[in-house]
Image (cartoon, helix red, strand yellow):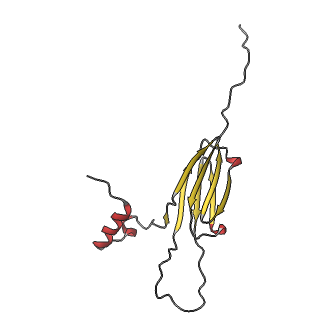
Amino acid sequence: MYVMPFSRMNSLLDAIGGTDKDFYDGEDKYTACRTDILEVGDSFVMESELPGFKKSEIAIDLDGTTLTIKAVHGEQEQTEGRYIRRERSRRAYQRSFDISGIDTEKISAKYTDGILILTLPKKKAEVPASRKLDIL
């Protein structure tokens, strides 16, 4: 037995008459965005590729200890003509990350040249307070 990448598996399914939507039960709406995570001092810097998106098409949601990045293209208005060939992707991206060790109040984000950059400060280690115990 060997592991086959999903993209190759989808191609095989297409070749035998199935589709990736059959295989995934129709849940193939989102693709995971490629993301690099770099540790810099007391923070992590996360860079996610979201090419061709406007800031207004990107959402960053925090739910407890989960951070989710979602990018969906708005519908492009077409007033004239019809496409003869369409090669540009209209993909949607979504990816979730565990941020249990992150100070969620201090997360910052910026989007430049198709790259979403999140700075995720680490939580400060809590040091127990010093005290003396009375002996009974």
**In the displayed image of the protein, which residue is found farthest to the left?**
1
Q: Quadrant of the C terminus?
A: top right
Q: Is residue 75 left or right of residue 1?
A: right
Residue at horizontal 63%, vertical 56%? 117
Compared with 22, 119 (above or below) is: above
Residue at horizontal 48%, vertical 67%? 29
Q: Is residue 96 left or right of residue 3?
A: right
- Provide residue 16's location: percent of width, then percent of height: 27, 72
- Provide residue 58's location: percent of width, then percent of height: 62, 65
Q: Depth check: 106 or 43 in front?
A: 43
- Provide residue 115's location: percent of width, then percent of height: 60, 62
Q: Depth check: 28 or 45 in front?
A: 45
**In the displayed image of the protein, which residue is found farthest to the top?**
136
Query: Which quadrant of the structure image shows residue 131?
Result: top right
Query: Which quadrant of the structure image shows residue 54?
Result: bottom right
Residue at horizontal 60%, vertical 89%? 79
Residue at horizontal 59%, vertical 78%? 75
- Provide residue 120's location: percent of width, then percent of height: 64, 48
